[in-house]
């Protein structure tokens, strides 16, 4: 596995086609898709394989636990416009609640500001994803707007919180 960059506990590599079955299993898990999108759709292994092929040039990475070699999840920049990158992340249930998400996001921010020369980083999070909102605020993200009356991936009413983190001095 060729790492692109790393953090204390994880290496970050490009997604591989051999991960497609694992991705499909996890992205179709309500514990994960609940926090990703309002209208969940189920993905096949073949659709995941095609997605992996399509994002090879994009700044999207697989998180690998250095100690176990397990896939922790995926994260990266979903879009980049005018020196601003929008990030997204999902963590497998096994690795949730152990600060892997915070560690990954902190490293992704550093990578975005230093290596990609971004001026700001944005994200959208469901308001009822309390752990994630607390994490993002703790890192320094601030709320820019709120979309009211949406539902999370399992249909629970909530709001979408849009947040931004600006590079120091910008």
Image (cartoon, helix red, strand yellow):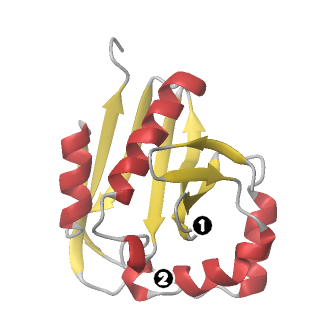
Quadrant of residue 82 within the rendered picture = top right
Q: How many labels were placed on the picture?
A: 2
Point out the image quarter for the N terminus: bottom right
Asked if residue 43 is positioned above or below residue 19 in the image, the reply reads below
Mark 1 residue crowding within 10 angstroms, few (<14) / some (14–19) / many (20+) = few
Asked if residue 157 is positioned above or below residue 144 in the image, the reply reads below
Q: First in sequence: mark 1 or mark 2?
A: 2
Mark 2 residue crowding within 10 angstroms, few (<14) / some (14–19) / many (20+) = some
From the top left corner, tell me how far across and down residue 16 is, in percent: 76, 65
Asked if residue 131 is positioned above or below residue 80 in the image, the reply reads below
In front of the other: 37 or 60: 60
Task: Look at the image and tell me whether residue 3 can be seen.
Answer: yes
Q: Residue at x 45, y 80 (%)?
A: 39
- Residue linked to disc 2: 40
The tag on residue 138 is: none
From the top left corner, tell me how far across and down residue 125 is, in percent: 32, 59
From the top left corner, tell me how far across and down residue 97 is, in percent: 27, 68
Is 43 placed left or right of 110 in the picture?
Answer: right
Q: Are marks 1 and 2 in contact (CB under 8 Å)?
A: no
Q: Residue at x 24, y 52 (%)?
A: 135
Q: Residue at x 73, y 85 (%)?
A: 45
In front of the other: 47 or 10: 10
- Residue linked to disc 1: 69
Point out the image quarter for the C terminus: top left
């Amino acid at each position: 596995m060729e790492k692109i960059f790393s953090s204390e506990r994880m290496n970050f590599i490009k997604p591989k086609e051999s991960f497609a079955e694992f991705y499909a299993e996890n992205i179709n898990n309500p514990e994960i898709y609940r926090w990703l999108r309002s209208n969940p759709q189920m993905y096949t292994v073949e659709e995941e394989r095609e997605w992996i092929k399509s994002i090879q040039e994009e700044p999207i990475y697989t998180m690998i636990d250095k100690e176990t070699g397990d896939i922790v999840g995926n994260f990266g920049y979903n879009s980049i416009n005018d020196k601003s990158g929008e990030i997204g992340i999902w963590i497998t249930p096994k690795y949730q609640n152990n600060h892997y998400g915070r560690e990954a996001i902190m490293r992704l921010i550093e990578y975005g500001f230093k290596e990609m020369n971004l001026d700001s980083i944005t994200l959208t999070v469901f308001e009822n994803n309390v752990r994630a909102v607390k994490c993002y605020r703790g890192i320094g993200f601030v709320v820019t707007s709120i979309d009211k009356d949406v539902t999370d991936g399992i249909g629970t009413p909530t709001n979408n919180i849009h947040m931004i983190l600006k590079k120091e001095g910008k």
